[in-house]
Image (spheres, grey):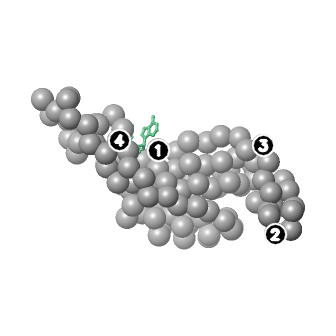
Amino acid sequence: MKKIEAIIKPFKVDAVKDALIEIGIEGMTTLEVKGFGRQKGHTEVYRGSEYTVDFVPKTMFIVVVAEDQLDAALKAIVTTSKTGSIGDGKVFISTIDEVIRIRTEESGGKAI
Ligand SMILES: Nc1ncnc2c1ncn2[C@@H]1O[C@H](COP(=O)(O)OP(=O)(O)OP(=O)(O)O)[C@@H](O)[C@H]1O
Ligand SMILES: [Mg+2]
């Protein structure tokens, strides 16, 4: 099982949600977050900006998927989120050891 943490532009949230549902993803979490990347929150890099760093609002999706869903989920997220502009976001992928559905106490892949 894999965990996808995708930090994207907030106006893309609905489109990403729809794209994930379209490929059969059934559960997901979003968080309103603030961050910056290599432009340090500036919309362009300009002389004298190096001492000011601004957090920019972003939305983070957390999606845990079976390994055979990973490529499709990543493709859905990346192609839907991409505008080609700076700040489009970033995706982090990690391995999940275990999942438990509390109601049924199912675990592993069938609990996703
Ligand atoms: N190394 C990182 N660790 C944790 N969060 C990050 C990291 N890099 C970026 N982020 C998060 O992702 C958001 C979007 O990053 P962003 O797309 O600006 O990355 P970038 O590397 O600057 O790429 P670009 O040049 O396309 O803007 C940031 O606002 C921040 O929340
Ligand atoms: Mg950036």
Task: Report, in whole angstroms, how far the alpha carbon at label 1 lies from the one at label 3.
Answer: 23 Å
Q: Please say whether residue 59 is visible from this viewpoint.
A: yes
Q: Amino acid at mark 1?
A: Lys
As measured in the structure, the alpha-carbon distance from the residue carrying label 2 to the one carrying label 4 is 38 Å
Q: Nearer the observer, disc 1 or disc 4?
A: 4
In the image, is the residue at mark 1 within 8 Å of ligand 1 by its beta carbon? Answer: yes
Which residue is identified by label 4?
Answer: 36
Q: Amino acid at mark 4?
A: Phe
- Horizontal side of residue 67 vs 8, given as left or right: right
Q: Position of residue 102 (x, y in %)?
A: 80, 64
User: Which mark lies nearer to you, 2 or 4?
Assistant: 2
Query: Which amino acid type is shown beneath numbered disc 2?
Result: Arg
State the CA–CA distance, disc 2 to disc 3.
19 Å
**Observer able to see residue 78:** no
How packed mark 3 is, by other alpha carbons closer than 10 Å (few <14, some 14-19, many 20 or more), is few
Residue labelled with disc 1: 90
The image shows residue 96 at horizontal and vertical percentages of 73, 44
Q: Which residue is mark 3?
A: 97
Q: Which mark sits nearer the N-terminus, 2 or 3?
A: 3
Which residue is at a point 46% across and 64% down the rendered structure image?
13
Residue at the image point whose x is 62% and y is 70% from the top: 22
Query: What numbered label is drawn on residue 35?
Result: none
Disc 3 versus disc 4: distance between alpha carbons?
29 Å
Lower position in the chain sequence, tag 1 or tag 2: 1
Q: CA distance from mark 1 to mark 2?
A: 33 Å
What element does badge 2 sit on? loop
Q: Which residue matches tag 2? A: 103
Q: Secondary structure at mark 3?
A: loop
Q: Nearer the viewer, residue 75 or 26?
A: 26
N-terminal label among 2 and 4: 4
Pointer 1 with pointer 3, Cβ within 8 A: no
